[in-house]
Amino acid sequence: MTNVILFDNEVRERLLPLTYTRPVANLRIGILTIREKWERMMGGTVSYITQDYLADRYPIEYEQDNFLVNASALPSDQLCRLMRQMEPNEAYLHNGELIAARMDDKQIERLMRDEDIHNLKGIDLEDTSFLKINHLWDIFRLNHLALEEDFDLITKGRVSEPISPTNQLLGKERIFVEPGARVECSVLNATNGPIYIGKDTEVMEGCLIRGGFALCEGAVLKMGAKIYGATTIGPGCRVGGEVNNSVLQANSNKGHGGYLGNSILGEWCNLGASTNVSNLRNTYDEVKIWNYEDNVFQSTGLQFCGLIMGDHSKSGINTMFNTGTVVGVCANIFGSGFPPKHIPSFSWCDNGALETYRSEKAFDMVERVMTRREVEFDTDERLILLRILEDTANQRSWENEPGT
């Protein structure tokens, strides 16, 4: 049986704040998470090497024979085929970065003790085709390609559920509806990319959807929503208004009007009614966003980049996010005007003024939100958030100012 271990490396720092609360492998891009892609394409078991404080929730499982795989690499047919041909002690490299290695249990144990692994034969993958996430913005920038790959993977050899005749369909052969989904009185255009409507989802009346698009299990697209393509709405999300080239991880809400473009929301986020996100600067210059690795604003090389929001963060009604805003974990933003372009984790942002969102109040909010979905706010989750609160204290500079 194939045993795959997905490991975090230095790329993890570039994917904060999303990777504060999860391993890189649990990021969603396309339809599936990276872990789910590897499970489907390699079979067998998949586990993690991640940060110590995440390891209880995301443990490692290893056997006598293991594939160690870079979690920021997405599987492709070609890459998986090459991996199945690997000999023990071989390692695949791409631009000097380890992508995959085949190791026994003793080597994995040495790796976990930070000891050197000897006798690995490096092989260059320069001619091998696969997608790889190197920066936060790659999640929405590469989403159209990941949607195509996941759509083919999930629907191969299967037949879509019937689609109600109340809908207008274009490119019907690239539209797939899972059992339990409800779609009525909407326009679905798959001529520019596939449309995947997951199990037990609902597309309410009057929605305009342009592919690529994925509505994952249990999610809802609210009446009159406009989806412009390369967009993923993760499991349990509720979305309305106008959305373009964005990825919502899971259980997050943008339930009302307002624009969200070239953006990523983590889990358990909520955008209040008429929250709007700018994804293009008035000067048309390249967008810069906050880089947690170097604690500076970094150029993305992109003209379009909107909002990156970590898990459990919220915005009040009429919030306006500037181009390239990064919000950490457990932040609460409300009031008039544009909030800062970097809002640290556990921030209470009132009309642009920042103070610390105290853990007891933040956790009360988290528990209420999760309970509404019948999900337990358990001890593991609480400890992870407490660790994030501690690790991000230096970002909340006002905590160290005299008199605070």
Image (tube, rainbow, N blue to C red):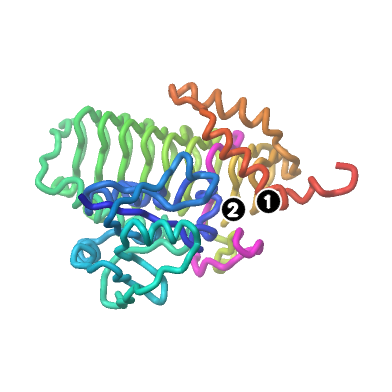
Q: Is residue 90 above or below residue 30?
A: below
Q: From the viewer's side, name the closer residue of 332 and 167.
A: 332
Three-letter amino acid code at disc 2?
Answer: Thr
> Is 172 in front, or is 234?
234
Does the residue at mark 2 contact the one at mark 1 (Cβ under 8 Å)?
yes
Predominant secondary structure, magenta span: loop
- Please say whether residue 280 is one of the residues in the magenta stretch: no
| Quarter of the rendering containing residue 77 | bottom left
Tell me the tag on residue 325.
2
In the image: residue 367, left or right of residue 349: left
Q: Give the tally of numbered discs.
A: 2
Q: Is residue 309 visible?
A: no
Mark 1 lies on a secondary structure that is loop
Compared across the picture, whether 286 is left or right of 109 comes to: right
Q: Amino acid at mark 1?
A: Pro
Between 167 and 99, the one lying in front of the other is 99
Which quadrant of the figure has residue 333?
Answer: top right
- On the image, numbered disc 1 is attached to which residue? 340
Residue occupying image coordinates x 46% and y 36%: 252
Residue at coordinates 53% horizontally, 48% vertically from top-left?
52
- Give the magenta-colored segment's residue range: 290-318
Compute the Cα span from label 2 to label 1.
Answer: 7 Å
Magenta residue check for 294 = yes
